[in-house]
Amino acid sequence: MKKNLQKIKTLAALLLLFCVSLSSCDKEPFTPEKKLIKIYFGNKTYEGKEISEEWFWEDNKVKKINYYYSGEVYDKTVHYIYEDNKLVKVTDNDGHYSITYSNSKISTIEYYRGGGISLATWEFNYLNGKISKIVFEYDSRFFEDKTAIAPFMSSFYPQKSIDFIAATSKGKSGGGTNITTYKYSGDNLKEVETKYPEYNNKMTTIFKSYDKMQNPYYKQIIFRNSVEMAFSKNNPLEYEIYFNETLYSSSNITYKYENEFPVEVINTQNNVVIYYEYE
């Protein structure tokens, strides 16, 4: 079970990449209603929890996050660099992400491995102030950087989509492109569809229901190994994943709350529990 926990932690390792508003056309920086200071992982099948992340804030901006391996051993620190209240660079020991803007919205994000080698680019499109499409172009060497792959990508893609992209790209020369579209119902994400033109396949995640409580990460492209954490105002309760037109998997999520914010998130499919501690 700890092996599964470590996989989830690895996927989460760099997700706090963009502490900026999804509707970043606002002139004032986004102010979080709750500030995370620690994140723990556990499992319903055994007692106890292990620290995974420790966040450090300066006013309303995250300046760095420490990550821990197996709940005790310090793993790495990720630093966040801002200019004019916008996040422009994210760095760790392996490389960095460079973020550019157009009319106060994120236009592109580019990943550079150490030594300045560009391996991946994301181009953003918007509709009614929300992200509607992302075009991802990558060098196959990008998937050799295990700490860079899923953590960042999970800000925008469901995990099953990431698994497919990584599996089909491993050992492949050159690179590839995929296109992801986002549909909403009010302030919550309704559907995420990723198409893989080279393989004539697609992966679709459909969110079936949400609670009515506050999602502390709404409008921040920052968190966790699930795309809904930044894109939806409320917290998802049920979703389904389809590969082409075939149901691939489904999940149900339950929560415990304090003051309308979640403090425990339980995935009933795998019994993993995430604990949030706020400032």
Image (tube, helix red, strand yellow):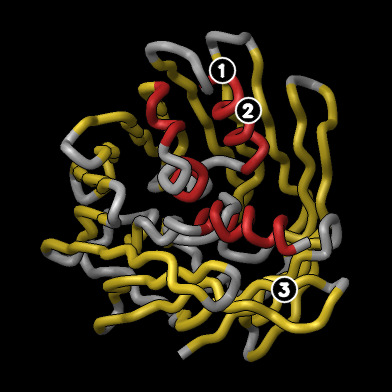
Q: Which residue is mark 2?
A: 164
Amino acid found under the numbered disc labelled 3:
Gly
The image quarter in which residue 220 lies: bottom left
The CA distance from mark 2 to mark 1 is: 9 Å
Q: Are the residues flagged by discs 3 and 1 in contact, CB closer than 8 Å?
A: no
In the rendered view, does 73 fall on the left or right side of 240?
left
| Rendered residue at 54%/78% (across/down) | 72
Quadrant location of the N terminus?
Answer: bottom right
In the rendered view, does 90 fall on the left or right side of 275?
left
| Rendered residue at 27%/46% (across/down) | 95
Q: Are the residues flagged by discs 3 and 2 in contact, CB closer than 8 Å?
A: no
| Rendered residue at 47%/42% (across/down) | 146
Mark seen at residue 42? 3
| Dot 2 or dot 1, earlier in sequence | 2
| Dot 3 or dot 2, earlier in sequence | 3
Residue 185 drawn at (x, y percent):
63, 48
Amino acid found under the numbered disc labelled 1:
Tyr
| Rendered residue at 62%/34% (across/down) | 163
Q: Which residue is mark 1?
A: 196
Residue 170 drawn at (x, y percent):
53, 22
Q: Are the residues flagged by discs 2 and 1 in contact, CB closer than 8 Å?
A: yes
The CA distance from mark 3 to mark 1 is: 34 Å
Quadrant location of the C terminus?
Answer: bottom left
